[in-house]
Image (spheres, rainbow, N blue to C red):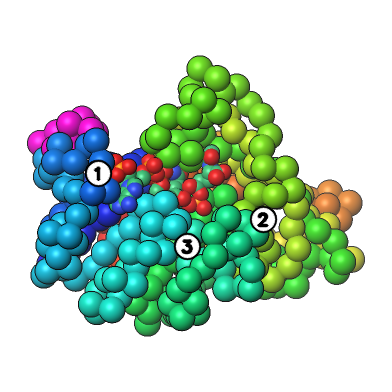
């Protein structure tokens, strides 16, 4: 059994991960942590997430000096479900102690000059670790994930978008000099557990946000290797992302070629389901799956992609990466 520590365990993504680790046959949930000054420090995890009562009753401990020392001792791997800047600061402290890190934040996802200043509002001060990080999009980067100690688990909207677009890009089916358009809606859990007026459930109906400046647009472009337009929306549901993606196909591309591209990419990947119907939030919420469906007409392809933002968009994808890194079956603890 591998001993796992989760930092940021009281948050929405960390909590999902704690439950997944608890259920995993090869992983032992060794410790759960929150910030040193957290109002939740020392509360039982199950008091914060009552669905886990009797399953995960460990306390969430404060990550003060003693907590940090304890978190490092006898630990085989660390998961960071913390804000980007917190992860940037914490990851090196575990990596230098020889403990592999699986970071759910955006802190190590994009290796591009000036990216963090422009899109995250801070200067990245760990360029060496950033250059060593592997992007944790499990279906596409399995070989690199197996060999790294720092996995930057892919973002939620980028996971839904890239799983839909990468097969087309890899097969050369996207028309040159065109820009795929990604229109996506997320549930409010995507904004995390902290209360804010803009993501308060009574305030949210359905609205676009982050127009032309959301940090996931460059993350998607960088890992696709091509330009995209990305427009997120906030919807009045708790969890799930539905992305509808519009792609101009290269001249002469047939439906058979599109089908073959998706089959080739995912026929051995049970987490990505090539559906015969348009995906829905209901079809994926609470599951580790990404559901894809597509249709084409007159050279235009429309692809639907749905995931649970807290699972395939965060914690279950982290677990896929852990499985790959430690040589377990890729879907162990997930299906
Ligand atoms: N929500 C989602 O759908 C997704 C989230 N992510 C990423 O995962 C990360 C967590 O997201 P989410 O769960 O939504 O966020 P939450 O705000 O729900 O949770 C954040 C967690 O971090 C803890 N925390 C805050 N500051 C520190 C600190 N200095 N040291 C240790 N722990 C700290 C918080 O507890 P406390 O404040 O009490 O200390 C809490 O447990 C983010 O980077 C996010 O971008 C990725 C994909 C999807
Ligand atoms: C609805 C909502 O607010 N979603 C968040 C994205 C979720 C998230 O935490 O982003 P990462 O996947 O990059 O970690 C946002 O738009 O910033």
Where is mark 3, residue-wise?
107
Q: CA distance from mark 3 to mark 1?
A: 22 Å
Closer to the camera: disc 1 or disc 2?
Answer: 1
The reply to whether the magenta stretch includes residue 295 is no
The percent coordinates of residue 149 (x first, y second) are 34, 77
The percent coordinates of residue 171 (x first, y second) are 70, 72
Q: CA distance from mark 1 to mark 2?
A: 34 Å
Closer to the camera: disc 3 or disc 1?
Answer: 1
The percent coordinates of residue 103 (x first, y second) are 38, 62
Magenta region: 44-56
Q: Residue at x 83, y 52 (%)?
A: 300
Where is mark 1, residue-wise?
37
Q: Tell me if the residue at label 3 has its CB under 8 Å from ligand 1.
A: yes
Residue 84 seen in this snapshot? yes
Q: Are marks 3 and 2 in contact (CB under 8 Å)?
A: no
Where is mark 2, residue-wise?
217
């Amino acid at each position: 059994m591998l001993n796992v520590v989760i930092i940021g365990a009281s948050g929405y993504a960390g909590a999902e991960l704690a439950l997944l680790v608890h259920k995993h046959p090869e992983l032992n949930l060794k410790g759960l942590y929150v910030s040193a000054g957290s109002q939740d420090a020392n509360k039982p995890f199950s008091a914060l997430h009552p669905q886990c009562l009797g399953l995960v009753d460990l306390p969430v401990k404060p990550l003060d000096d003693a907590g940090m020392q304890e978190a490092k001792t006898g630990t085989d791997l660390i998961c960071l479900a913390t804000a980007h800047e917190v992860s940037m600061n914490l990851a090196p402290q575990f990596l230098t102690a020889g403990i592999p890190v699986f970071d759910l934040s955006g802190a190590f996802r994009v290796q591009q000059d000036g990216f963090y200043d422009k899109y995250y509002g801070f200067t990245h001060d760990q360029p060496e670790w950033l250059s060593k990080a592997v992007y944790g999009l499990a279906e596409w980067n399995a070989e690199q994930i197996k060999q790294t100690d720092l996995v930057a688990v892919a973002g939620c909207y980028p996971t839904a978008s890239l799983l839909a677009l990468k097969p087309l890009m890899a097969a050369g089916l996207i028309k040159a000099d065109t820009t795929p358009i990604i229109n996506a809606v997320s549930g409010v859990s995507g904004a995390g557990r902290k209360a804010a007026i803009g993501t308060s459930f009574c305030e949210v109906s359905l609205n676009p946000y982050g127009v032309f400046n959301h940090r996931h647009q460059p993350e998607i472009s960088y890992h696709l290797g091509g330009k995209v337009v990305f427009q997120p929306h906030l919807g009045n549901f708790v969890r799930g992302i539905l992305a509808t993606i519009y792609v101009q196909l290269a001249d002469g591309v047939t439906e058979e070629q599109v089908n073959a591209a998706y089959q080739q990419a995912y026929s051995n990947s049970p987490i990505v389901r090539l559906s015969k119907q348009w995906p829905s939030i209901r079809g994926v919420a609470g599951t580790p799956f990404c559901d894809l469906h597509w249709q084409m007409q007159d050279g235009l392809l429309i692809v639907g992609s749905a995931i649970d933002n807290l699972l395939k968009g965060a914690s279950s994808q982290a677990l896929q990466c852990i499985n790959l890194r430690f040589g377990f079956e890729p879907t162990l603890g997930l299906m």
